[in-house]
Image (spheres, rainbow, N blue to C red):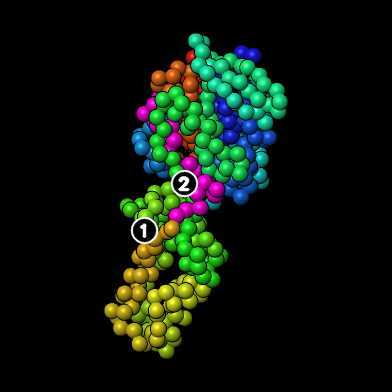
Amino acid sequence: MNYDTIILGAGAAGLMCAAHCGGRTLLVDHAKKPGEKIRISGGGRCNFTNTGTTPANFLSANPHFCKSALARYTQWDFISLVSEHGIAWHEKTLGQLFCDDSARQIVDMLVGLAESAGAELSLSTAAEEITRTEGGYALTLLRGKDRQRVTTRTLVLATGGKSIPKMGATAFAHELARGWDIPVTETRPGLVPLTFAPERFPGLSGVALPARVGTGAVSFDEALLFTHRGLSGPAILQTSSYWREGEEIRLNLLPGQAPFPLLRAARATAGKRSLTRSLDALLPARLSDHLAIEWKLTGNLADQSDKALEALSERLTDWHLLPAGSEGYRTAEVTLGGISTDALSSRSMEAKDHPGLYFIGECVDVTGWLGGYNFQWAWSSAMAAARAIAAA
């Protein structure tokens, strides 16, 4: 069987590319259903893009690489596509857009577009062997016990990264690239909860509050969640992409507030109140209790000098913690790093030294923040490749 294009990976990027690259296209995935990561995302409603998408929202060894693809297929282009297909959506915080109904609507839209474009979809199918030929690429596909040899002029890798292996995620694209001497940058889990020693936060599992969390020169103002394993919530997930093992993270438990004047004012009006219970006006009670033990807070407000209150205020707004690690790829939403952008054309996503070979989506060393940015990279990088393929 001969094809113009074979796309490996029927996730967000693969489906988008199949819907727009034209010609005789085969879309292959080892999963039983297409778009499974889309289906589970956003609590089942798919945070499909972000109105504030800019190149600054992405991590990469080359922060300029994503600019071309993002500029030529923007968040507004995908929003228009969603609206044209009658999918109702709404905006949550920080420009995050979600389906009103179900993430399945996005999957159905993309599958429908791919089928309308004439693409064939082969699920529960594994690519066993890939070789280069004079006119393109040859693949051995395995479906059940049936093996099939196919050839293609163009091969697109949209197989994602290693995040959430229980859904079948693998490092397939990275392994293929290394075998063909295409550089791959260091990969690690991103947008992932951070872990601490057992019982580091006893009794705090489920406590959530707005916070500013950061590491190095970056910080994020979003929700913080204590778990039985450590810390999670959007502020932690965002920070995790910048954090490295052995580094501390900083927590401001009262972003946008100045606790010292609040505590001093409370001392003047409720001096007999215990210091611990005074914190309840600022923090969840269980967190107040925990901090009282960890920081050895004793006495009433009236017993506290200005210096003591200033020191407490500093700890509340600059609490340094050393994570033991992260929950790893098991719960990571994305894989940081991947196919080196030095090896790819930023305009087409084609490998510079391998004509007809493209890498799109998560397998590339471009990783977005939490909030719809990674889906936008999937759409934009897929369209960059699809347009180049269609024009070839």
| Amino acid residing under circle 2 | Gly
Q: Which residue is mark 2?
A: 190
Q: Looking at the image, is mark 2 or mark 1 earlier in the sequence?
A: 2
- Closer-to-camera residue (94/213): 213
- Residue 214 falls inside the magenta stretch: no
Q: Is residue 54 above or below residue 127?
A: below
- Closer-to-camera residue (324/25): 324
> The residue tagged with tag 2: helix, strand or loop?
strand
Q: What are the residue bounds of the magenta stretch?
A: 325-345
* Contact, mark 2 vs mark 1 (Cβ under 8 Å): no
Q: Residues within 10 Å of mark 2 (few under 14, many from 20)?
A: many
Using residue 333 as the reference point, say whether residue 142 is left or right of it: right
- Closer-to-camera residue (195/3): 195
Q: Position of residue 330 (x, y in %)?
A: 55, 48
> Is there any visible trace of residue 236 in the rendered image?
no
> Is there any visible trace of residue 276 in the rendered image?
yes
Q: Which residue is mark 1?
A: 248
What residue is at 57 percent from the left and 39 percent from the top?
A: 169
Q: Position of residue 153 (x, y in %)?
A: 53, 15
What residue is at 67 percent from the left and 21 percent from the top?
A: 147
Q: Residues within 10 Å of mark 1 (few under 14, many from 20)?
A: some
Q: Is residue 331 above or below residue 213?
A: above
What residue is at 37 percent from the left and 66 percent from the top?
A: 319
